Image (cartoon, coloured by chain):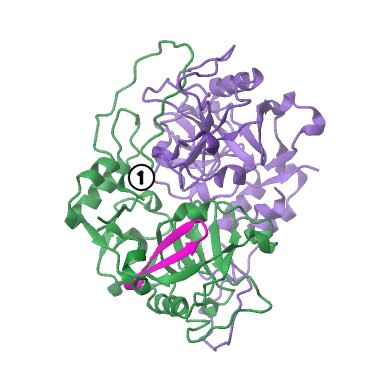
Chain colours: A purple, B green
């Protein structure tokens, strides 16, 4: 994923194949040109970026390529630790993607409910980490924009978050690409053996109802294009629909030559505030009406390959 | 798409393969059970649904199956008319899906910019229909929830809409599955020869910047899983990536035996208000914290097969 490709959603400008042409009224009030998200990313400085922490980065290798997940231990310390323990004991290796529900989530884990893969040292279940105390998070940068799901929203160290100052709680938000921990009806019934990624419109009503552990920072198309499952909730009803997980490893355990190297824009930087503003109020000539607003899950968090 | 499958986003309940078990603290304050979206759809009456208007329904037949699009002539009368004229002269037949950008849009039209397919009777360009006067829309039902992109949001005859009473304008909102008209920088440079569908997080900043013409009401997975294009903005850079459009027809022109029969829940019905409320404040046992809010693009608009 190159920086140029991160200039997401910067318009639908395209060479239309036009047969014939007619003169229409001139543009009403053109907006002044402004730097785009792509322009700001391009002009950013080295200090605006941070490397991934290899001990909190996961590689899920699928037949089609690699998915890179950044864990957020600030928001789910026990689950992040347990998922790394699961990875390190090889729990996910040979398991599969087992669910793809359109406009919702893609999920992976053990396809064999009747004869489940045993867990060696990691935990099968953990107490929920739906929220953490506000004081755990020292990197929050608030978005000034209104949000219906949380009293405050913004970013913390490269992750979209909600917070409730009155309750003293903060949590990771269910935006596209966020990774959560599947559970049954009991809050404490998940532990990380079943993971999912948001692959559609952000299901923010799940916020504070599920432990969210991180974000896919590369390889999202390998998950988002998985054919949708025909069973209820997009589960696969035939083994041949499953996509096998070749390997699921902590980046720190992977030989250096096999590592994927990415950098994340520091969301606490002034440059990131410019990124947000560029998306909040896009300039002309393509844009005719600036939104004057940005939803939390529409704020791009730039990722680039490290040199 | 059966009604049962429209009970979207009703949770991640699943049989977790649990090895071992531990006792954790009891659930804090369980929410009382409430009817789910699926329950309300199941209990709905015939009068809560309307059939599709065959003269404003399009079938795009792809190798993998059919995409059904409902046009919204209230919001884009000239574009709806022109797209039907394009369909009726066979313009789209043999053209292709030419773009798939992750978490954004999938687009179709003429892949051959240098030697474009000629248009016979339809128009290549039309004046923009980014908004229409409020008085054009008599079916609006307002959502009480806050929205950052529009002074008011809600639904009109099965479509998500924004409106600005001060300016006297209303428009279709860029939610998942909405179909828009690609254009170049000039507002009046589109006409319907290049169409796209929203396939990711709702890009509401495009509202009032593009003519939106309708909504995919069946077959969305055929579009949302199209492998992402490697060229900038997800365009395909090799002809073999294109997915051919076998036929693109107005439903009214299709022999009855070949028609797809669907019904849409009337968004002005009391039952639809219950659907919205069920999603806004979901009950237990799975849900622990009710959101107390729903974003416009998270409000499901139920579709079912007609008997």
In the image, is B2 to the left or to the right of B242? left
At which x and y percent is residue A109? 53, 28
Q: Estimate how packed mark 1 is, as few (under 14), some (14 to 19) or many (20 or more) residues with alpha carbons within 10 Å.
A: some
Eyeballing the image, is A72 above or below B127? above
At which x and y percent is residue A182? 46, 29
Q: Quadrant of residue B148?
A: bottom left
Q: Main secondary structure of the magenta part?
A: strand
Does the stretch in magenta take in B45?
no
Q: Nearer the viewer, residue A241 or A4?
A: A241
At which x and y percent is residue A26? 53, 84
Q: Nearer the viewer, residue B62 or B17?
A: B62
Q: Which residues are magenta?
A: B55-74
Eyeballing the image, is B176 above or below B194? above
**How many marks on residues?**
1
In the image, is B294 to the left or to the right of B92? left
At which x and y percent is residue A173? 49, 38
Quadrant containing the C terminus of chain A is top right
Q: Quadrant of residue A34?
A: bottom right
Eyeballing the image, is B33 above or below A9? above
Pointer 1 residue? B5
Q: Nearer the viewer, residue B304 or B204?
A: B304
Does the stretch in magenta take in B73?
yes
Q: Quadrant of residue A222?
A: top right
Q: Residue at x 57, y 42 (%)?
A: A223
Q: Residue at x 66, y 19 (%)?
A: A88
Q: Chain of mark 1?
A: B
Q: Residue at x 42, y 32 (%)?
A: A208
Viewer can see residue A260: yes
């Amino acid at each position: 994923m190159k920086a140029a490709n991160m200039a997401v959603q910067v318009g639908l400008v395209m060479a239309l194949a036009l047969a014939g042409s007619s003169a229409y009224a001139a543009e009403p009030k053109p907006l002044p040109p402004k730097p785009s998200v792509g322009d700001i990313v391009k002009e950013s400085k080295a200090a605006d970026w941070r490397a991934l922490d290899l001990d909190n980065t996961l590689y899920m290798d699928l037949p089609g390529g690699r998915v890179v997940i950044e864990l957020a231990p600030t928001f789910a310390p026990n689950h992040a630790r347990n998922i790394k323990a699961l990875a390190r004991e090889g729990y996910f290796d040979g398991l599969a993607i087992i669910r793809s529900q359109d406009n919702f989530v893609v999920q992976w884990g053990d396809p064999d409910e009747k004869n489940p893969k045993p867990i060696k040292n990691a935990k099968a279940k953990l107490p929920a980490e739906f929220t953490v105390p506000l004081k755990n998070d020292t990197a929050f940068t608030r978005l000034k924009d209104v949000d219906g799901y949380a009293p405050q929203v913004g970013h913390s160290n490269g992750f979209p978050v909600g917070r409730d100052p009155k309750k003293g709680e903060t949590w990771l938000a269910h935006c596209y690409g966020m990774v959560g921990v599947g559970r049954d009806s009991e809050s404490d019934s998940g532990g990380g053996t079943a993971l999912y990624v948001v692959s559609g419109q952000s299901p923010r009503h799940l916020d504070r109802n599920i432990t969210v552990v991180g974000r896919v920072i590369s390889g999202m198309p390998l998950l988002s294009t998985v054919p949708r499952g025909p069973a209820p909730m997009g589960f696969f009803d035939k083994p041949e629909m499953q996509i096998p997980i070749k390997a699921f490893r902590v980046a720190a355990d992977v030989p250096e030559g096999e590592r994927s190297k990415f950098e994340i824009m520091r969301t606490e930087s002034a440059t990131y505030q410019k990124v947000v503003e560029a998306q909040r109020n896009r300039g002309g000539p393509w844009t005719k009406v600036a939104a004057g607003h940005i939803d939390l899950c529409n704020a791009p968090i730039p990722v680039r390959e490290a040199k």
